[in-house]
Amino acid sequence: MITERLRARTPHSAAESMPRAAAIIRAGGLVAFPTETVYGLGASAFDAPAVARIFEAKGRPTFDPLIVHIADRADLTHLFTEAALADPRIKLLADAFWPGALTIVAAARPEVPGLVRAGLETVGVRLPRHETALSLIRAAGTPIAAPSANRFGRLSPTTADHVLEQLDGRIDAVLLGEATDIGVESSVVALDGSGPARLLRHGGIPLEDLARALADHGGIVAAAPTAQPGVPLQSPGMTESHYAPMVPLVLATTAFPDGVAECALLAPDRATLTHLETLATAAGAKVHASVALSETLDPAAAAAHLFERLHELEAALISRAVPAARIIAAPYPEGGLGSAIADRLRRAAATPQ
């Protein structure tokens, strides 16, 4: 298979590329496209064979559900049950955060394919604010199921080049649209009517903002961050090991890790990076590349650059064929958008099961 490159960065190129991309979706194909969070890999949400191709292309286990992307809140009537739509928190959250980096999980209509839902009774839905994503959904005339456009468990893509590095030849097309700007996936909130909302995944909308929005409607609690083995995931991004580069990543929580002779360094800010470089030198480790997510501790800038910087460090070590190399990362401070960054780093450092 040859993956088509469809340009959509300007109104003129989008006018030429969007009909082609939409036709691929309607025909059961796969199209990678940019959103404000990361690049997604899309298929028609109600086309079960097309959805199955997403799992095949990514090597994604079927216990991991997909998020359905819509371009109009009216589409919720095709995805959520009437009982779910009666929950006033859906309108409250949509008014506050849509279009944007929030996925709402609620009871699914039976028409939503079981593979999208990982066999659960719920489905996650998001209305993105990225114009290319919205244009594709509208042109296709159908909600689009789309996880991140990468191989399962690997680094999420924030550019078309990241997509092609992992999926070239495995998908039908990629839309070369505007860059992502948030840089981490959406926050995922579950509403089941029997208690407070539950945060299933930290993401582009901080927990603190969600808590303020829901303060008069039962509040919100953080669910267990990692699913139990063999149990269908309630949300994407809940496996213990996820978002991982091909070069092992190690979190330097207290001191420089023992036994690391060759490495690349990642830190939240310039001051922490300087300290990490000092520790590496004292440990006798050779540093091949180092980068700070922001000059000062800026969570928005850090999130926007997180996966891009990890891709860069991964490439720097792989290109040098450094044996037993490691990416050494300093943890990111929790709180606000920093909680999403910290979550991604913890999962990237976890040992695959």
Image (cartoon, rainbow, N blue to C red):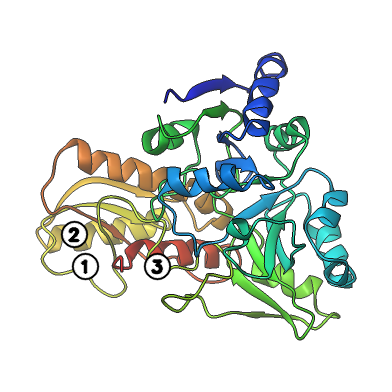
Whether pointer 2 and pointer 1 mark residues with C-beta atoms closer than 8 Å, the reply is: yes
> Can residue 294 be seen in the rendering of this structure?
no
Whether pointer 3 and pointer 1 mark residues with C-beta atoms closer than 8 Å, the reply is: no
**Residue at image point 33% right, 51% down:** 245
Q: Position of residue 78 (x, y in %)?
A: 82, 54
Which residue was labeled with disc 3? 346
- Distance between the Cα atoms at labels 3 and 1? 16 Å
- Distance between the Cα atoms at labels 2 and 1? 7 Å
**N-terminal label among 2 and 3:** 2
Give the quadrant of the N terminus.
top left
**Residue at image point 42% right, 32% down:** 164
Q: Is residue 185 above or below residue 333?
A: above
Which residue was labeled with disc 2? 280
Query: Which amino acid type is shown beneath numbered disc 2?
Result: Ala
Which residue was labeled with disc 1? 256
69 left or right of 141 in image: left
**N-terminal label among 3 and 1:** 1
**Residue at image point 64% right, 43% down:** 36
Give the quadrant of the C terminus.
bottom left
Label total for image: 3
Callout in the foreground (2, 3): 3
- Distance between the Cα atoms at labels 2 and 3? 20 Å
Query: Which amino acid type is shown beneath numbered disc 3?
Result: Arg
Choose between 31 and 253: the one closer to the eye. 31
